[in-house]
Amino acid sequence: MDWIPAVTTTTLFAAALWLVRKLIITRLSRSVQHEFDQKLEIVRADLRASEEKFKAALREKEAEIAALRSGALSAIASRQAAIEKRRLEAIDQIWAAFNSLAHARGLAAQMAIIKFEEAARETERNPKARQLFEIMGSGFDPLKIDGINADKARPFISPMAWATFAAYRAIVMNSVVKWHILKGGLGKADLVDSDVVKNLVLAALPGYKDYLEKHGTDALYYSLEGLETQLLSELKTLLTISEFDKASVEQEAEILRLANELQTANEKAERAA
């Protein structure tokens, strides 16, 4: 029976070791779990803080996009309004300049029925012929012709409107120059290149090519009616829609497209987060 106490002692010692081991494992597990919970809570807090910062950044970006979109469109609208106002003023300026040529056109109508070369030879040697032409244009005042405002209006009207007006003015002033030559008895002074005026007219009225080829530059006066009709048509077009309108719409569309792309990218980033 001597072995009984030894077995009992060994059993009790083993049980004690098992309990101690179990206790140590439990305590270690709880300690580790507690530390893990603390770190997990810290990570969660950091994530919540990061999420709030990210959402705040997104809201800030959205506000920036809205401000950009609003500001850009507002700037375009303001600029467009200024251009529209100036364009309307330019139309008034061109039409006023056109009307200021009315008396000169009357003089051009008289010059249209005169054979210039023959008249030039006659006025060069005959003072009475020069006096006749001076009486013909006695009521003409070149200072009443408005050329400055027309030139100021040029950037704000269409190229065709300007070409038409320029051709009209060139024909009328060509006749005025010829009148000055005749009343001054300067002979066949070649002060105006009629071919240049002809090319200007053809740029605005291509349909007159055969007519001018047949009758020459002396018939330039008879294209004034067509140029006036063309100018009126161009100015009416400018009153309805212009290249400026198209450019503005395209610019606004591009801004909206870029803003929408940025907004979509932000939304994707938010979903990914």
Image (cartoon, rainbow, N blue to C red):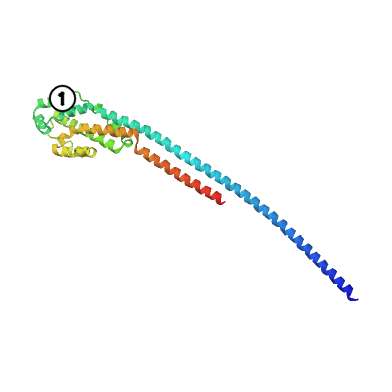
Task: State the residue lying farthest toward the right.
Answer: 1
Q: In the image, residue 208 lies at what x, y percent?
A: 19, 37
What residue lies at 18% left-to-right and 27% top-to-bottom? 107
**Residue 222 is at least partly visible in this image:** yes
User: What amino acid is labelled 1 in the image?
Assistant: Met
Q: Which corner quadrant of the image does residue 171 belong to? A: top left
Q: Which residue is mark 1?
A: 136
Q: Residue furthest front?
A: 1
The residue positioned farthest toward the bottom in the image shown: 2
Name the residue rendered at 62%, 51% in the picture. 47
User: For this rendering, which residue is in front, 235 or 183?
Assistant: 235
Q: Position of residue 5 (x, y in %)?
A: 89, 73
Q: Is residue 19 left or right of residue 270?
A: right
Residue 249 position (above or below residue 148): below
Q: Residue 61: horizontal and vertical position, in percent?
A: 53, 45
Q: Residue at x 26, y 30 (%)?
A: 98
User: Dividing the picture into quarters, in which one does residue 12 lie?
Assistant: bottom right
Callout 1 crowding tier (Cα within 10 Å): few <14, some 14–19, many ≥20: some
Name the foreground residue: 132 vs 228: 228
- The percent position of residue 24, horizontal first and vertical second, equals 77, 63
Q: Quadrant of the N terminus?
A: bottom right
Q: Secondary structure at mark 1?
A: helix
In this rendering, the answer to whether 268 lies above or below 170 is below
The one of 144 and 241 positioned closer to us in this rendering: 241
